[in-house]
Image (cartoon, helix red, strand yellow):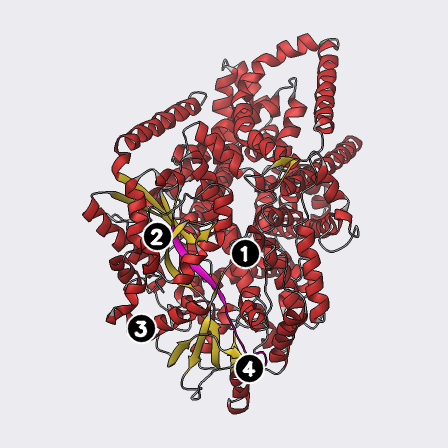
């Protein structure tokens, strides 16, 4: 498109972006400053959040935890978080894709009711469901295993994933698949070869959602896991907040360590999203 | 794809069974211990456990459980036999433990002959119904930290502290403590002969003594003896910087003090006016043995081991604990820490925190009353009477058990209606053909249906079913629709009265509407801005703007709460920098609500931005190009091409966003915490309070959850129908 922007448009867009970035970054800088200073909340302050006496002590404390055998506990827990979150994204997407495809393409008995029920699951406050889940996993002998946690997280992420993907699939023209089928492909082949690649950006974003919800979840993880070397990072993070006091520095340092991988992933996924789009499946 | 899931389940099952089998084989010489310690205390515990392993040849597995999840984890795990053998916790929850059968009689670990080895108060705190339920390990209570540079005279009475006002520079305060927290007010209460919880489990913070104690604190604040709104962080800072002569705090402050100021610790003073001591509540940390552990001599032995002389010495020296084992204090090395010894002396005079489960329900109303008085919104008598009324309202006796007939009738009716519609549908012409055509499609959806039904719907239904019951765990009984009836009639109070369902609903709606409007507005604007083809560094902008979303929401909430801090918060620093007076954010509904709103807008706009971006990319470029060729202006292109194509795609996300915001627990609970006076609570946080801070009324909380669900369900159906009609019109 030959779109020569006016100066005004440039200024407005940039002002908007700069303002939004300032809004987005300010609290993050605040946490960073907290992580770099000793002495908790009062160690930082003022309009510009700068630590009074910068130190990496908090990071050393968080990263340096070892279990009684001297193994590197933080590394272990980081690995847990990564495995659990990746598996959640994979399982969640794998379960959601066929269902979302069916909802986008075919009429069938119970479709309306199914969609409504899916939406309904998002409306029920989860305050009350931790204990029933615990009993359920106990019956399945899946307590205290990463597999059990992945199943629960994946199931929780499925309704939203289906919504996202249904929208994406219905955007992809049916003609694309039909053309492939005319060329001799089966429905399944057409789906795998044509529809899936075209929906790649949406799948990437949906997978990211699932990954992040698992990466950040703490209540279920704390309830369902009972071995320190099985803990995920948010559970570890929560330990820095006690009954009478909170180790703000360690909490902030841990928060940053937890957030960095997600940011990195986002950066990668954004590129994936863009490249998926320029591949041009949508336009046909 | 179809195989992966069952395979995964199978593998996990096998692994879990294998782990189970292995565990069974060696369990005789292996025990599990839960605790919530960290830092020095954790190090000491590890040392003590390591010695036990060497000496007895038992493998001790220590698990550090986050404090926030501690109780719920015990409640879930112990009854199913998955809990620890021994756990360390404060004695204040003993009432809950015994009521729910989470602990066993610990006389095996602390026999009649052992009693004399421990501080008398701490043993008393752990004795209930004539049985000893735990081995006392350490005590925590409030004491007085005195800056010896600022204070040269002896502090024997509270009046001595008040007199310091005259001699201190104006920049320093005589006394700093968390004045608006009930826990810190309890010593004042006791000095006036009043109590928080009466012997009958009633709210006893009423009457002359209680009123005088609150009035005294109000006067202390007015006379600038105590600073305004002192939080824990402020208290610490004032003391460290030598700006507070005296502070009231617990042993946890010790670990944060280095040698910034010379200080000593002493028991709390006496209030000269009444001649009574300020006796704080005493928390006794103890080793409890679970019913499972009681069957293992190694577990009982470990509980005993924790309290013995050598362990106590380690816990005092390494863990810096105020140990409850007497012999440790005879040790010259332990005695050298005068601060610990002072806390030990303070503990002797302290009142053990009542173990009644009803104590839980006193904190919130009492906090609210104290804050109201300190803000000058109410006189002590009115505020405390209101607090008592709120306590009585929460602790009202459970309703009588009705016959299950109405619930059964309704359930039966619902089933009948379902069957009727099902049959009618099935007999409709063409249904068979339709079903036959649908059969192959079911292959696509079956995994999702099974997964969601088992792991999402089933737990929710089980949760919802508890709404027909009342009472905490261990004494639940069926009450039919009584919970719903009470909620919907505001328990006999004014329909829009404090804490009523309807008032909270109004706040929730306001909360949802403002949030979603801001999310969509900002998200749309940023999405459109980022989609400008000429914009450079798109990936960088995008990632920076996504940042709020990458940070876990509980971290966000805690960080924002810090930013609204009265003294250290960035918000007030900014206000001061531009010449405005600092705001006490959580004292008024409007500012507290704004604080919540800002936090949640920050948290939620990246989602709408990403959704907008995704939707924008799927708008075919040729349509836009065609419009441009036809001479449409930029605005016309947006208005007639982009927007109509964009909105249908955004609607599901907006709908979901609204639902999520409606149930956004983290922000409300962690940022304002319902302050002031519970007015900023939304329905979900209110439900949470019923379940966890108001005597565990899970049934009542579940009824709230079901009502929230019904509201949202009906609202989205109505909205959805309207949207469909509008779409049909456009088409």
Residue at the spot of label 4? B272
Crowd rating for badge 2 (residues with CA inside 10 Å; few <14, some 14–19, many 20+): few
Sequence-first disc among 4 and 1 = 4
Q: Which residues are magenta?
A: B272-287
Nearest the viewer among B224 and A2 is: B224
Crowd rating for badge 4 (residues with CA inside 10 Å; few <14, some 14–19, many 20+): some
Residue at the spot of label 2? B112
Chain identifier of the residue bearing label 4 in the image? B
Image depth: mark 4 or mark 1 in front: 4
Count of numbered labels shown in the rendering: 4
Q: Is residue B284 above or below residue B131?
A: below
Nearest the viewer among A72 and B375 is: B375
**Location of residue B714 (image quadrant):** top right
Residue at the spot of label 1? B557
Residue plotted at (60% across, 57% down): B362
- CA separation, marks 2 and 3? 31 Å
- CA separation, marks 2 and 4? 40 Å
Residue plotted at (72% across, 9% down): B430
Q: Secondary structure at mark 1?
A: helix
From the image, which quarter does the C terminus of chain B lie in? top right
Nearest the viewer among B431 and A265 is: B431
- CA separation, marks 4 and 3? 30 Å
Image depth: mark 3 or mark 1 in front: 3
| Same chain check for tags 2 and 3 | yes
| A264 horizontally vs B430: left or right | left
From the image, which quarter does the N terminus of chain B lie in? top left
Sequence-first disc among 2 and 4 = 2
């Amino acid at each position: 498109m030959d779109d020569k922007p006016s100066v005004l448009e440039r200024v407005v867009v940039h002002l908007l972006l700069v303002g939004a970035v300032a809004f987005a970054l300010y609290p993050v800088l605040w946490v960073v400053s907290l992580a770099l200073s000793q002495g908790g909340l009062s160690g930082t302050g003022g309009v510009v959040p700068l630590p009074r006496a910068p130190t990496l002590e908090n990071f050393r404390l968080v990263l340096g935890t070892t279990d009684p055998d001297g193994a590197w506990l933080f590394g272990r827990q980081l690995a847990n978080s990564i495995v659990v979150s990746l598996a959640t994204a994979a399982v969640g997407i794998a379960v959601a894709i066929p269902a979302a495809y069916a909802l986008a393409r075919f009429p069938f008995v119970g479709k309306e009711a199914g969609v409504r029920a899916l939406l309904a699951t998002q409306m029920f406050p989860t305050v009350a469901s931790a204990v029933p889940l615990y009993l359920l996993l106990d019956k399945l002998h899946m307590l205290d295993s990463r597999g059990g946690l992945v199943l629960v997280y994946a199931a929780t992420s499925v309704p939203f994933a289906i919504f996202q993907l249904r929208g994406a699939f219905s955007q992809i023209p049916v003609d694309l698949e039909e053309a492939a089928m005319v060329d001799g492909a089966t429905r399944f082949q057409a789906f795998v070869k044509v529809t899936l690649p075209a929906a790649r950006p949406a799948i990437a974003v949906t997978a990211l959602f699932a990954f992040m919800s698992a990466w950040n979840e703490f209540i279920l993880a704390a309830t369902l896991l009972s071995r320190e070397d099985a803990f995920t990072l948010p559970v570890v993070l929560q330990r820095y907040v006690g009954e009478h006091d909170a180790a703000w520095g360690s909490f902030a340092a841990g928060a940053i360590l937890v957030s960095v991988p997600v940011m990195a992933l986002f950066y990668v996924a954004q590129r994936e999203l863009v490249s998926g789009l320029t591949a041009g499946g949508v336009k046909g | 794809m179809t195989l992966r899931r069952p395979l995964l389940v199978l593998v996990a099952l096998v692994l879990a069974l294998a782990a189970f089998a292995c565990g069974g084989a060696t369990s005789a010489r292996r025990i599990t211990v839960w605790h919530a310690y960290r830092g020095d205390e954790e190090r000491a515990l590890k040392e003590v456990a390591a010695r036990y392993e060497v000496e007895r040849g038992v493998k001790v597995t220590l698990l550090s459980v986050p404090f926030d999840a501690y109780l719920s984890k015990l409640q879930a795990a112990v009854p199913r036999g998955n809990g620890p053998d021994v756990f360390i916790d404060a004695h204040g929850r003993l009432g809950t433990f015994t009521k729910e059968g989470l602990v066993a009689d610990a006389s095996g670990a602390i026999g009649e002959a052992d009693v004399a080895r421990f501080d008398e108060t701490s043993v008393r705190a752990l004795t209930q119904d004539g049985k000893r339920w735990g081995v006392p390990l350490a005590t925590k209570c409030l004491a007085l930290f005195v800056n010896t540079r600022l204070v040269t005279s002896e502090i024997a009475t509270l009046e001595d502290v008040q007199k310091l006002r005259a001699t201190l520079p104006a920049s320093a305060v005589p006394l700093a403590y968390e004045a608006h927290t009930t826990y810190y007010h309890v010593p004042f209460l006791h000095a006036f002969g009043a109590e928080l919880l009466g012997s009958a489990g009633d709210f006893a913070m009423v009457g002359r003594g209680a009123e005088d104690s609150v009035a005294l604190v109000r006067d202390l604040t007015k006379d600038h003896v105590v600073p305004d709104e002192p939080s824990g962080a402020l208290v610490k800072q004032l003391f460290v910087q030598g700006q507070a002569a005296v502070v009231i705090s617990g042993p946890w402050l010790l670990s944060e003090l280095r040698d910034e100021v010379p200080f000593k610790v002493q028991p709390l003073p006496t209030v000269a006016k009444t001649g009574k001591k300020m006796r704080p509540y005493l928390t006794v940390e103890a080793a409890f043995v679970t019913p499972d552990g009681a069957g293992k001599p190694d577990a009982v032995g470990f509980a005993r081991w924790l309290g013995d002389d050598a362990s106590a010495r380690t816990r005092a020296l390494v863990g810096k604990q105020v140990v409850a084992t007497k012999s440790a204090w005879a040790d010259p090395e332990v005695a050298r820490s005068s601060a610990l010894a002072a806390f030990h002396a303070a503990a002797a005079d302290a009142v053990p925190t009542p173990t009644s489960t009803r104590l839980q329900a006193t904190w919130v109303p009492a906090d609210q009353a104290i804050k109201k008085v300190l803000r000058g919104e109410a006189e002590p008598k009115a505020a405390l009477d209101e607090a008592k009324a709120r306590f009585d309202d929460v602790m009202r006796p459970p309703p009588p058990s009705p016959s299950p007939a109405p619930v059964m009738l309704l359930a039966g009716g619902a089933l009948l209606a379902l069957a009727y519609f099902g049959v009618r549908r099935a007999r409709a012409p063409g249904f068979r053909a339709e079903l036959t055509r649908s059969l192959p499609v079911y292959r696509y959806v079956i995994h999702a249906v099974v997964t969601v039904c088992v792991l999402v719907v089933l737990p929710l239904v089980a949760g919802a079913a508890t709404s027909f019951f009342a009472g905490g765990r261990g004494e639940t009984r069926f009450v039919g629709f009584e919970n719903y009836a009470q909620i919907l009639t505001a328990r006999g109070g004014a329909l829009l009265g404090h804490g009523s369902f309807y008032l909270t609903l109004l706040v929730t709606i306001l909360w949802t509407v403002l949030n979603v409007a801001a999310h969509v507005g900002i998200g749309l604007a940023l999405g459109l801005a980022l989609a400008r083809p000429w914009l450079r560094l798109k990936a960088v902008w995008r990632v920076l703007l996504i940042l709020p979303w990458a940070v876990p929401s509980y971290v966000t909430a805690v960080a924002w709460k810090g930013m609204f801090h009265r003294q250290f918060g960035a918000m007030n620093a900014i206000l001061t920098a531009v010449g405005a007076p600092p705001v006490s954010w959580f004292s008024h509904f409007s500012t507290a609500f704004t604080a919540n709103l800002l936090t949640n807008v920050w948290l939620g706009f990246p989602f709408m931005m990403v959704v907008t971006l995704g939707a924008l990319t799927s708008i075919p470029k040729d349509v836009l190009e065609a419009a441009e060729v036809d001479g449409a202006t930029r605005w016309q292109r947006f208005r007639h091409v982009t927007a109509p194509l964009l909105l249908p795609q955004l609607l599901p996300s907006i709908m979901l966003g609204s639902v999520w915001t409606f149930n956004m627990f983290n922000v409300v609970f962690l940022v304002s915490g319902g302050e002031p006076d519970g007015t900023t609570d939304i329905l979900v946080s209110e439900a949470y309070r019923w379940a966890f801070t108001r005597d565990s009324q899970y049934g009542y909380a579940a009824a709230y959850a079901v009502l929230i669900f019904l509201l949202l369900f009906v609202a989205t159906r109505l909205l959805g129908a309207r949207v469909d009609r509008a779409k049909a019109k456009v088409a």
